[in-house]
Amino acid sequence: MVVENSIIKIPKNFLQNFAQLDNGAEWVKYSVSGNGSCFYNSAAAALNYNNYMKHSVKSQEAIGRNLRRQFQREINENSWSEFWKHHNLQHVAPNYLKARQEVADPKTWANLWTIYVFSCWTRTNFIFYDMDNECLPYCGITTVNPAKCPQRPKNCMLPDSKWNLVTIAWVNKSHFDPIMVFKNYCKSCQMPTHRSQLVRKNHNLVLNFKKNEKLYKDILKKYNQGKCSGKTIQDAALKN
Ligand SMILES: [Zn+2]
């Protein structure tokens, strides 16, 4: 069992699927609570919602719940139908009452549709990495069919090129944890006692990636090279 609020390095054999980092920086997985709200906890961590990263595990759970509740409040019959109409996806839109109920229930996992709406609500692009599968990165949250994107701008497959990017691990097909960059990873970082207080002198966690940064572009390049880059959430929903 991985301790919550701790980091572990992304295994070496997965690194070929991740953008290369500067010396001393490491791709890490940050463990969040797995209480049915792990997607919202992951998002809260990556967006540092209400200063999530500075809090104890207990407070972090409350912050994750709070983010979830905020999101739920945004879902009403009107906003929901407008959203899907705007994206030309009325025909696949989940029922608004059911969606709202699912977001309200802290034990219900976020599904792909919900994550897509959440992505647009927070104006954030999400890329997921399947930690049990070589197909990494396996899913960017998009509804854009690659065939409609002939010029293939760098992140044509994600909702919006002006938004920041968050990377999330899909673990054991049952849990989400955010993936971050830990700068100046040192030898002592292997020791849990050293890691427990994450932001120390000469250490720095990069929670999410800003457009125009080189790393943002490198991550998208890897994503676009991946065999699942063209997969839309409609495709993914059909298979599940
Ligand atoms: Zn260290």
Image (cartoon, rainbow, N blue to C red):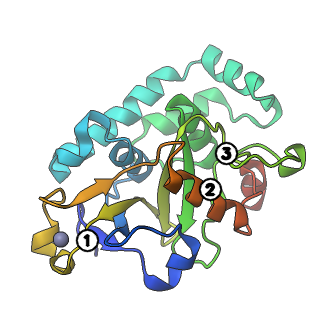
71 in relation to 216, above or below: above
Q: CB atoms at circles 2 and 3 under 8 Å apart?
A: yes
> For the residue with label 1, is its CB less than 8 Å from the closest atom of ligand 1?
yes
Please state if 38 lies on the left or on the right of 75 as rendered.
Answer: left
Name the residue rendered at 56%, 59% in the picture.
Answer: 219
What's the mark number on residue 62? none
Q: Amino acid at mark 1?
A: Tyr
Using the image, determine if residue 11 lies above or below residue 201: below
Quadrant in the rendering for residue 130: bottom right
Residue neighbourhood size for the residue with mark 3, other residues' Cα within 10 Å, grouped as few (<14), some (14–19), many (≥20): many
Assess disc 1: are there few (<14), some (14-19) or many (≥20) residues with their C-alpha within 10 Å of its C-alpha: many
Does the image show residue 200?
Answer: yes
In the rendered image, residue 111, in percent from the top left (x then y), is placed at 58, 48
Quadrant position of residue 179? bottom left
- What's the CA distance linking mark 3 and mark 1? 30 Å
Find residue 14 and report its horizontal and vertical position in percent: 52, 79
